[in-house]
Image: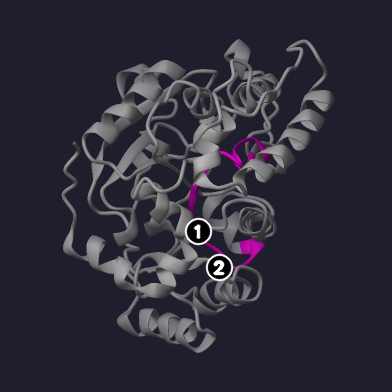
């Protein structure tokens, strides 16, 4: 038996009826009344030729996604009776992920380098994945604690204020990645996840850096994981539509960042083109087509209430009504922030209160996770 040590608010938060209504499957997996999506995916037979074209494999993935959703509608008892098949939905998603790796389009930078042949793009990662740490995290949002966090080395963003710059950026061109992180294959990553479950994790939380450059390894590891545990995607969310399709049915819970309310700020502070357009598209997809169980993290930045915080909240209330929002006041100047005077301070209490008041006026649920 696993004994989970909870923060007091991690237990009390579930007294919030609205939160329970929005996160029913996640809570059900914790209570072992529901089955994690990745386990169901193992029962979806996918007979495919690995030499087939990418287009045909993508079409098969779309077809099998519909089948997966039909199984998802069945009762837990019916789902438990299903058998794992040797060639399944996860095999297909992993095959496609490795194909994309040959001309990498995991994120919307679309560097299109052949990472299989050890070419590297912006994230500076080849075909291998590296974990900087994996531990039971007690500092995540109350419903997510204790969280089995797996931090990946490397990131597809270049945020000038990054608080995890040691694993996302600062090592590039300076150190060998093997000197700062542990290389993991699909079986090793699965073993890490299972050990975190044994320690009392209520979810497996893929974070970084960012997990996006490691989609192939994460998806492949699901074939070897054994626990009925929530799979949680914690990311800057700058995925391509194709790469999101690989994990859309496999993730039970989503913890995406939403930093900027426009494209211009995304370009200035993270070096990203079309930031708002991509992030809005991806949030809409997981809300409408995925599990819909989402906590959006918005880091309130100084001098960015009108251009960023309010437009994001406007979009959430209009397009993402099932989402919960963590309004984060933890911004502090880090990394290269001193080169940008407008963000070279912490947000004021007045700025934080203005954002929260705006969320209150819109009727957004945030207090239970912020």
Instruction: Assign a secondary structure to mark 2.
Output: loop
List x then y, in percent, for residue 160: 45, 51
Dot 1, crowdedness within 10 Å: few (<14), some or many (≥20)?
A: many
Instruction: Assign a secondary structure to mark 1.
Output: loop
Which one is in front, 269 or 57? 57
Does 364 sit left or right of 140 as displayed? Answer: right
Q: What range of the chain is rendered magenta?
A: 244-264
Which one is in front, 24 or 175? 24
Q: Is residue 269 above or below residue 215?
A: below
Does 135 sit left or right of 130 as displayed? Answer: left
Q: Mark 2 points at which residue?
A: 322
> Residue sitting at 33 percent across and 40 percent down?
149
Please tell me in which quadrant of the rendered image residue 152 appears.
top left
List x then y, in percent, for residue 126: 54, 20
Please tell me in which quadrant of the rendered image residue 246 appears.
top right
List x then y, in percent, for residue 74: 60, 46
């Amino acid at each position: 038996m696993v004994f989970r040590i909870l923060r007091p608010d991690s237990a009390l938060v579930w007294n919030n009826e609205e939160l329970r209504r929005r996160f029913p499957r996640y809570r059900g997996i914790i209570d072992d009344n529901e089955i994690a999506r990745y386990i169901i995916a193992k029962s979806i037979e996918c007979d495919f030729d690995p030499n087939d074209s990418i287009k045909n494999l993508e079409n098969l993935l779309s077809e099998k996604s519909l089948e997966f959703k039909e199984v998802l509608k069945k009762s837990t008892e019916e789902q438990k009776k299903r058998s794992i098949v040797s060639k399944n939905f996860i095999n297909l998603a992993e095959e496609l992920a490795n194909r994309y790796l040959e001309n990498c389009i995991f994120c919307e930078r679309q560097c299109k380098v052949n990472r299989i042949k050890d070419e590297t793009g912006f994230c500076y990662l080849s075909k291998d994945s590296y974990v900087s740490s994996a531990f039971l995290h007690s500092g995540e949002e109350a419903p997510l604690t204790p969280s089995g966090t797996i931090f990946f080395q490397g990131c597809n963003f270049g945020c000038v204020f990054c608080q995890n710059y040691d694993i996302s950026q600062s090592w590039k061109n300076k150190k060998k990645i093997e000197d700062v992180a542990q290389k993991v294959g699909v079986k090793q990553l699965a073993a890490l996840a299972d050990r975190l479950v044994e320690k009392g994790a209520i979810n497996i939380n893929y974070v970084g850096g960012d997990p996006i450059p490691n989609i192939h390894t994460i998806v492949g590891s699901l074939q070897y994981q054994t626990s009925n545990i929530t799979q949680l995607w914690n990311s800057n969310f700058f995925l391509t539509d194709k790469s999101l399709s690989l994990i859309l049915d496999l993730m039970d819970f989503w913890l995406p960042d939403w930093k900027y309310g426009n494209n211009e700020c995304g370009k200035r502070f993270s070096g990203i083109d079309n930031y708002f357009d991509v992030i809005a598209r991806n949030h809409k997809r997981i809300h409408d087509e995925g599990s819909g169980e989402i906590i959006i993290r918005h880091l309130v930045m100084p001098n960015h209430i009108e251009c960023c915080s309010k437009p994001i909240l406007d979009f959430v209330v209009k397009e993402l009504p099932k989402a919960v929002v963590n309004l984060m006041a933890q911004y502090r100047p880090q990394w290269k922030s001193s080169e940008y005077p407008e963000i070279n301070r912490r947000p004021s209490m007045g700025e934080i209160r203005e954002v929260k008041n705006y969320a209150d006026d819109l009727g957004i649920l945030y207090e239970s996770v912020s």
